[in-house]
């Protein structure tokens, strides 16, 4: 073995075990691996999990809060307007510098794959896409980045369509969008048609912001349009819907019907509660119902210190704690569901192969300073050891020393 991680717990297993790694691959998992290895790590009974997967991120705008006008109303409309102002003075080098800082935090916090939505609009052009593709090269081997083109202006016109194609031609991995921001039902339909045409032309996945409000009766509601299109185009399993706050406002019977349709279309769903709770009028979706229906559900960190979410440090355990609260996941075993939503479920969305802690899988894993998923979220456990492709890339140990005595103790 090239590296042995000793004395760790795996989810669903009672007894601690050792993980033996050869090169970039997990070769053996046993209660006690015999023989000494030159490089050993003592997991101290902590939980070992595969790298976090953050399937919805706006890394192009990470740390942009310092470049934008201050918030007044806190609405999504205002956040979008502030982002257009900030993007005007942001170059490719600026995207790379801000993104690099965020990705270093992501690595330290145990995130191994991120799907990034990159704005494409008239003022910024493909600056964001270019910066993110450069970051993808820089961080190869540390974080697997998938870069999406997000048409970030409405209504969608021919000039924006051309910009989207330019972004795709640069090497983007998938197509994003926000159909509900169109100005009419016909505009929503045209937008969705265009997104699917690009997806089929470039053979990429569709990953859309959808109905980011709490208006069940909006004229530009997009979810059902996308679900129908997914079925007619035979794109089942390749479409992800994000946010979807409006679903929470549907009457119960209508929500149940649409969730059933989402299941039939094998839609993935990604919640971003860190943003949904802080932007006025957005609100989280019916996360728990979607999970219960068997829809592949993930949560994501989303924005990081920008116009949409002023807080963040690229920490998926922290984002998971928001998900537990926003989704009313209030039992200890619910923590297992949400841990899946930050690991194996988004790995399916991103199509990551050889993912997980198993013999033969790529050795991308975190050893936490807590023994279970519940304790990991409760304590915001240290990522004691972060291993990427068999290599130790980060370690963190938080120490607190108490300088007082308790009376009567
Ligand atoms: Zn987003």
Image (spheres, rainbow, N blue to C red):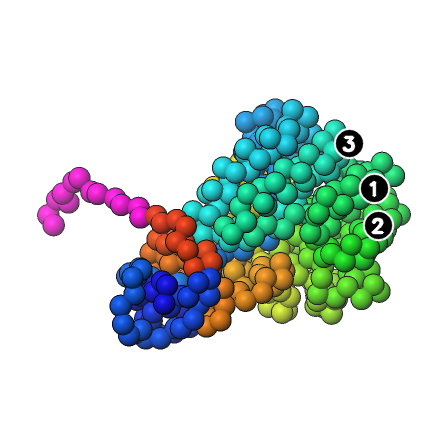
Q: Which residue is mark 3?
A: 122
Between 173 and 150, the one nearer to me in the picture: 173
State yes or no: Cβ of the residue under disc 1 lies below 8 Å from any atom of ligand 1.
no
| Left or right, 190 with reference to 179 | right
**Percent coordinates x, y for residue 307 in the rendering:** 60, 33
Query: Residue 47's mark?
Result: none
Mark 2 to mark 1 CA distance (whole Å): 8 Å
Magenta span contains residue 89: no
Sequence-earlier tag: 3 or 1: 3
In the picture as drawn, the residue positioned furthest to the left comes out as 408
Q: Residues within 10 Å of mark 3 (few under 14, many from 20)?
A: some
Q: Quadrant of the N terminus?
A: bottom left
Which residue sits at x=43%, y=47%?
Answer: 108
**On screen, residue 132 above or below 56:** above
Asked if disc 2 and disc 1 are in contact, CB closer than 8 Å, the reply is: yes
Q: Which residue is mark 1?
A: 161
**Percent coordinates x, y for residue 8 in the rendering:** 34, 65
Q: Which residue is mark 2?
A: 194
Asked if disc 3 and disc 2 are in contact, CB closer than 8 Å, the reply is: no
Which residue sits at x=39%, y=73%?
Answer: 29
């Amino acid at each position: 073995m090239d590296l042995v991680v000793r004395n760790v717990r795996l989810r669903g297993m009672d007894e601690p075990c050792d993980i033996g790694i050869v090169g970039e691959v997990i070769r053996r998992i046993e209660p006690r691996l015999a023989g000494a290895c030159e490089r050993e790590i003592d997991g101290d009974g902590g939980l070992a999990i595969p790298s976090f997967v953050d399937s919805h991120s706006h890394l192009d705008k990470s740390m942009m809060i310092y470049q934008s006008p201050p918030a007044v109303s806190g609405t999504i409309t205002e956040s979008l307007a502030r982002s257009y102002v900030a993007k005007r003075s942001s170059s490719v080098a600026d995207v790379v510098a801000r993104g690099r800082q965020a990705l270093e935090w992501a690595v330290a916090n145990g995130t191994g794959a991120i799907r990034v939505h990159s704005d494409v609009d008239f003022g910024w052009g493909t600056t964001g896409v270019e910066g993110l593709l450069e970051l993808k090269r820089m961080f190869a081997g540390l974080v697997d980045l998938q870069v999406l083109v997000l048409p970030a202006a409405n209504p969608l016109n021919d000039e924006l369509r051309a910009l989207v194609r330019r972004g795709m031609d640069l090497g983007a991995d998938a197509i994003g969008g926000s159909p509900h921001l169109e100005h009419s039902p016909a505009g929503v339909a045209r937008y969705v048609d265009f997104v699917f045409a690009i997806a089929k032309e470039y053979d990429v996945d569709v990953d859309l912001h959808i109905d980011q409000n709490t208006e069940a009766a909006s004229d530009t509601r997009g979810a059902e349009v996308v679900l129908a299109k997914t079925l007619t185009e035979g794109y089942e399993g390749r479409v992800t819907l994000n946010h979807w706050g409006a679903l929470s406002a549907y009457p119960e019977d209508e929500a149940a019907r649409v969730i059933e349709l989402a299941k039939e279309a094998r839609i993935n769903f990604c919640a971003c509660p860190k943003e949904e709770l802080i932007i006025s009028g957005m609100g989280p979706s019916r996360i728990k119902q979607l999970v219960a229906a068997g829809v592949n559900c993930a949560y994501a960190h989303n924005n990081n210190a920008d116009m949409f979410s002023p807080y963040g440090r690229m920490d998926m355990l922290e984002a998971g704690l928001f998900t537990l609260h926003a989704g009313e996941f209030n039992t200890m075993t619910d923590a297992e569901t949400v841990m899946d939503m930050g690991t194996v479920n988004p790995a399916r969305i991103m199509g990551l192969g050889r993912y997980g802690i198993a013999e033969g899988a790529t050795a991308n894993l975190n050893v936490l300073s807590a023994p279970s998923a519940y304790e990991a979220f409760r304590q915001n456990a240290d990522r004691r050891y972060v291993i990427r492709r068999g290599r130790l890339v980060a370690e963190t140990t938080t120490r607190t020393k108490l300088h007082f005595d308790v009376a009567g103790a």
